[in-house]
Amino acid sequence: MSMYLFDEHPIIANKTLAREIGLNEALILQQINYWIEINKKTGNNFYEGRYWTYNSIRKWQENDFDYMSFDTVKRTFAKLEKQGYLLSGNFNKDPRDKTKWYTLNDEKLIELYQKIEQKKKEEELKILQENVDNFTEFNTMPNALGQNAPMEKGKIHQCNSSNCTNAFMQNAPMQYGNLPQPLPKITTKNTTEITSDISTNPSIIPLWTQTQEKNIEYEDNNIEIWKEGGMENKKSYHDYLEILRKNTCYYDHLEVGNHYRAEEIDEILTVLADVMVYDDNDYIKINQINMKASVVRERFLELRYDHLEHLVTILKNHDTEVRNIRAFILTAAYNILTTIQSYYTNKVGFDCNH
């Protein structure tokens, strides 16, 4: 019907496999697999615990790979045998018949698959690590949520309102009603002391251990805003946390007794919920780029069960290599909607062909 559509059975290859071992090699392996699958369905050519297919190199070239030269087909078959991806044998009834029989070496292909997956993980980590490497004001994150990071002298960001553009300034006051933890009392006196301590001390007091006193002046100001109706439609930290928990099947894990997995998921969700309370026009740093809080929030609201499972796996695989866990989580969670699609596309593509 069209010169660009197939009127005959197409020859296909997995892109990931082609990148790894070569296009001709991937095409031949795929076609060998095609004939083996036919033999499996018909129950033919089963020897030594495997299904086989056979042909001479000349027939392979004429019938299946006529777009390649005879020498190319011959060389590619020999290469695949030498590399161990193809196994050969002779099960001809006539001893004078030297036609080779071929089958796939499943063990070698599994080994290749594991190698490819490991390379993907390393590349994924490299990309994510590059996205957070330049956060110099938070060079070391000993705490999983990133509140205990030492800062460089002279780089302390003082946020006096909710319009804080730094996604990782957890000690900045937020809107009244949106605070997951009590705010410390800030005065001229103790602000000076804190600034001095941060410059010389290797850690900052964690948010949840700070004094229960609030900044009265800031609180009063937010109460006035609340009374004027400026915050009536805003969700709190706990509102967003509950939404994320329901979206990602957190409670399902608890219900079936997977408490450890639920805890792993919740550690990620608390980081995400903490920045989702920002005003729409505030900025959150993702991939070293200042993103509108409204954009980041909508992205996080799209996260579902499989995204969190994949994200937990990424963090487990690289937990000892990442210095800034909080920034890593924000970046990985923002990117996971696209990276997981590529991951499963390649994985399913490989599985379907093997």
Image (spheres, rainbow, N blue to C red):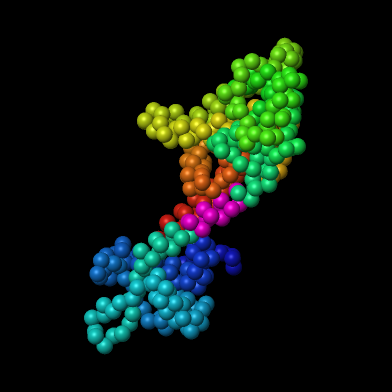
Start-end of magenta stretch? 117-128
Residue at image location 51% in from the left, 46% down from the top: 320
Q: Is residue 221 left or right of residue 125?
A: right
Please provide percent x and percent y for residue 113. 44, 60
240 in the magenta segment = no
Residue at image location 68% in from the left, 32% down from the top: 198
Please provide percent x and percent y for residue 243. 55, 27
In the rendered image, the vertical position of residue 316 relative to residue 167, given as above or below: below
Quarter holding the N terminus? bottom right
Residue at image location 69% in from the left, 43% down from the top: 136
Task: Answer whether residue 90 is visible to the viewer in this image.
Answer: yes
Between 186 and 51, the residue placed more toward the observer is 186
Please provide percent x and percent y for residue 206. 59, 28
In the rendered image, the vertical position of residue 213 relative to residue 95, given as above or below: above
Between 326 and 335, the residue placed more toward the observer is 326
Q: Is residue 251 left or right of residue 126?
A: left
Please provide percent x and percent y for residue 218. 73, 17
Between 220 and 135, the residue placed more toward the observer is 135
Residue at image location 59% in from the left, 65% down from the top: 4
Magenta: predominant secondary structure element? helix
Between 277 and 93, the residue placed more toward the observer is 277
